[in-house]
Image (tube, helix red, strand yellow):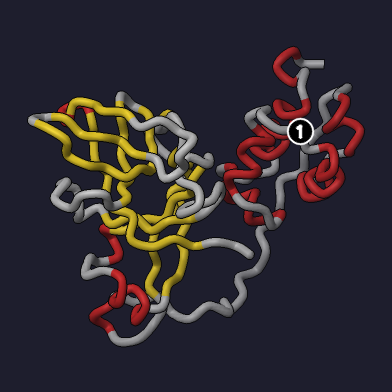
Amino acid sequence: MDESLDTPHARLQYARRAAGFADKAEFAREVGIHATTYRAYENGQNGFAKLASLFAKKLGVSTDWLMHGGETPDVPLRVPSPPTRPDLPPVRGASDGDGAIAVRQVDLSYAMGDGTTLEDYPEEERILFDPNFLRRITRATADRLFVARGDGDSMFPTLLNEDEVVIDTTQRILNMQDRIWACAYRGAGMIKRLRVVGDGMVEVRSDNKTIGDHVVPAEDLHIVGRVIWVGRRV
């Protein structure tokens, strides 16, 4: 067996590419799981034994080869499905009348803890929002908004792990005390409350009282935008 295919996640990546799926997000949509979840399988962060038969069927390989290896098979190039009429409403801008507005979803976790290293080129998807709802929560245009996911419990009970947030990137000046911001400190992304506490210093605060707060130089803190909405699955 090819030494580069000596792990299940390496074989999954090989088969996905050989089958003609251009990126991880495309295959994730094909099998009906979130791109973040699938990427953890292909990157070797999580095992995928329970989904191996589904992946193998979609990729035209055997489950045994995918999980245990062996002679590298010839992976059949997939035949794209014929286009179907989408069930989603048409995507329009806010000025074009009432229609769904697409907001990019950045496949990147903002830590509600000590921080998650920011990726240079996070994968993106699109989430459709009702235009009237967006107008109620922000005056920013859709291209200045993005959806990201929280990771951790330091903002509990305001934010829970895996909550999705809408971030307004037009708001990048710390002119409101104690609001919740998406920011980066020394390359680590996080969602925190921020408060100016002195000349050139900012207090990075957690809502979870068991987590300590930190005071950092303002020049080392990069504000990505303000959190204006929180979505949660129940």
Residue for point 59% across, 48% down:
35
- Residue picked out by circle 1: 47
Residue for point 70% across, 26% down:
10
> Whole-percent x and y of residue 204?
30, 35
Q: Can residue 116 be seen by looking at this rendering?
A: no
- Tag 1: residue type? Gly
> Whole-percent x and y of residue 105?
44, 54
Identify the element where label 1 is drawn.
loop
Q: Residues within 10 Å of mark 1 (few under 14, many from 20)?
A: some
Residue for point 53% across, 77% down:
88
Q: Is residue 154 above or below residue 129?
A: above
Question: How many numbered discs sit on the rendered protein?
Answer: 1
State which quarter of the image contains the N terminus: top right
> Whole-percent x and y of residue 87?
58, 79
Q: Which of the 4 image quadrants contains residue 167?
A: bottom left
Residue for point 39% across, 32% down:
118
Q: Point out the residue furthest to the top here.
A: 3
Q: Can residue 45 be seen by looking at this rendering?
A: yes
> Whole-percent x and y of residue 172?
19, 48
